[in-house]
Every structure is written in C-alpha cells, then in structure tokens.
Image (tube, helix red, strand yellow):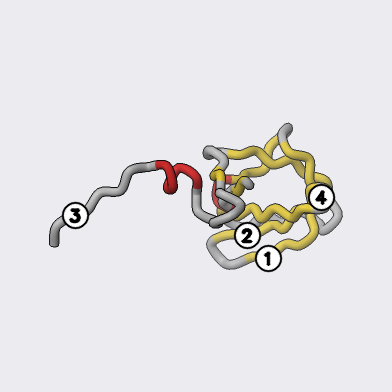
C-alpha cells in the first residue's frame, strides 16, 4: 500500500495523467482533487492555482512514496526501523 503527501505533488508537463475533479483555494495554498482512474489524488499547491474542473493535468512527485503495511496500517520503514528510548 502506498501513499503520497499532497504537498509532495506538483503540476508538471509530464508525469501522472489526472483529471481535475475539484479545486479549493485556501488562501496560501490551493488543493486540487485529481482523478487518476478510480483513485483520487490530492495535490496541495502554493498560491492560487485555478484549472477548470475536468481539465487534464500531469502530476509529478517531489518526494519518495510512503509504503504502509496493509495489515497494521503502519509505515513500513517505521515498522522495520529500530526504536530508541530517550531518557527523560
């Protein structure tokens, strides 16, 4: 199971083909809900970005994909990484 943080997606000339399903301007950022097949990806973009709903866009990933254990829901690298106790 994989996950991408919305702030790690950006608009690009090439990449993941998606169709804009919703646009929400939040003041400092704009959140695009983009349909990729039957999945919806959220992209949090700086400033005001206003593509029309239905527009085809391309999304690029600016950070690594986060992998999760389907059974526990925990991030895989967090499960495999040793834990450290910090004294108070």
**Residue tagged 1:** 24
Query: Does label 3 or label 2 sit earlier along the sequence?
Result: 2
The answer to whether the residues at label 2 and label 1 have Cβ atoms under 8 Å apart is yes
Query: Does label 4 or label 1 sit earlier along the sequence?
Result: 4
Q: CA distance from mark 4 to mark 1?
A: 15 Å
Residues 49 and 70: in front is 70
**Residue tagged 4:** 19
Judged by depth in the image, the label closer to the viewer, 3 or 2, is: 3
Q: CA distance from mark 2 to mark 1?
A: 6 Å
Q: Secondary structure at mark 2?
A: strand
Q: Few, some or many C-alpha atoms within 10 Å of disc 1 (few <14, some 14-19, many ≥20)? A: some
Residues 73 and 52: in front is 73
Determine the image quadrant of residue 80: top left
Residue 45 seen by the camera: no
Query: Does label 3 or label 1 sit earlier along the sequence?
Result: 1
Question: Which residue is farthest top?
Answer: 14
Which residue lies at the image location 71% right of the left edge and 34% below the top edge? 15
**Residue tagged 3:** 86
Q: Few, some or many C-alpha atoms within 10 Å of disc 4 (few <14, some 14-19, many ≥20)? A: many
Q: CA distance from mark 3 to mark 4?
A: 47 Å
User: Seen in the image, is 83 located left or right of residue 53?
Assistant: left
Q: CA distance from mark 3 to mark 2?
A: 39 Å
Judged by depth in the image, the label closer to the viewer, 3 or 4, is: 3
Q: Secondary structure at mark 3?
A: loop
**Residue tagged 2:** 30
Query: Does label 2 or label 1 sit earlier along the sequence?
Result: 1
Q: Secondary structure at mark 1?
A: strand
Judged by depth in the image, the label closer to the viewer, 4 or 2, is: 4
């Amino acid at each position: 199971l994989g996950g991408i943080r919305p702030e790690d997606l950006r608009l690009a000339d090439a990449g993941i083909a998606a169709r804009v399903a919703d646009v929400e301007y939040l003041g400092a950022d704009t959140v695009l809900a983009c349909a990729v097949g039957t999945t919806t990806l959220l992209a949090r973009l700086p400033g005001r970005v206003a593509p029309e709903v239905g527009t085809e866009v391309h999304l690029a990933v600016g950070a690594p994909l986060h992998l999760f254990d389907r059974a526990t829901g925990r991030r895989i690298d967090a499960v495999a990484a040793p834990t450290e106790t910090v004294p108070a």
